[in-house]
Image: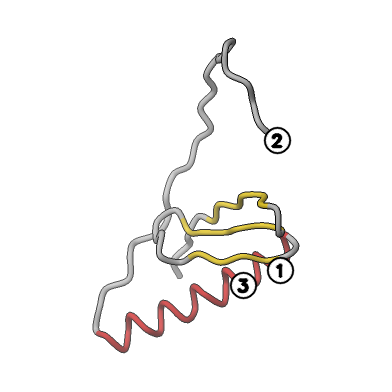
Amino acid sequence: MIQYTAQYLKIPSGYMGRLVEWPEVVTEGRTLEECREQLRDALREMVLAYGEMGRDIPPGNALMEALAVETPHVRQTA
């Protein structure tokens, strides 16, 4: 079992999701749950496609960490 790290971004039409370790796996959904499900489906499809092509799938298990930076002169967007 390999675990991949999902990243979600709020966009005007809902959410965009991608895998940090496998940037080609990207999708969108109207809700966060729909995006998660679409991302799982896209991951399964990519694993199958890479297998058919004889390509190695990217390793997973990225270590993610939030880093804070003080930005007094930069406006944050919603």
Can you identify the residue that label 2 sits on? 78
The residue at the point 71 percent across, 59 percent down is: 13
Q: Are marks 2 and 1 in contact (CB under 8 Å)?
A: no
Given the image, on which type of amino acid does mark 1 rest?
A: Glu
**Residue 34: which disc?**
1
Residue 67 location (% of width, % of height): 51, 27
Position above or below: 14 against 63:
below
Coordinates of residue 33 in the picture (x, y in percent): 73, 64
State the quadrant of the N terminus: bottom left
Q: Secondary structure at mark 3?
A: helix
- Please state which amino acid type lies under the numbered disc 3: Gln
Number of marks in the rendered image: 3
Give the CA separation, mark 2 to mark 1.
Answer: 21 Å
Q: Earlier in the sequence, mark 2 or mark 1?
A: 1
Q: Quadrant of the C terminus?
A: top right
Tell me the crowding category of disc 1: few under 14, some 14 to 19, or many 20 or more residues within 10 angstroms, Cα based. some
Image x and y of residue 36, in percent: 65, 65
Q: Which-is-in-front pick, marks 3 and 2? A: 2
Residue highlighted by disc 3: 38
Q: Residue 41 or 60: which is nearer the viewer?
A: 41
Are discs 1 and 3 less than 8 Å apart at CB? yes
Identified at 27% across, 85% down, the residue is 53
**Amino acid type shown at disc 2:** Ala
Query: Which is nearer the N-term, disc 3 or disc 2?
Result: 3
Whole-angstrom CA distance, mark 3 to mark 2, is 24 Å
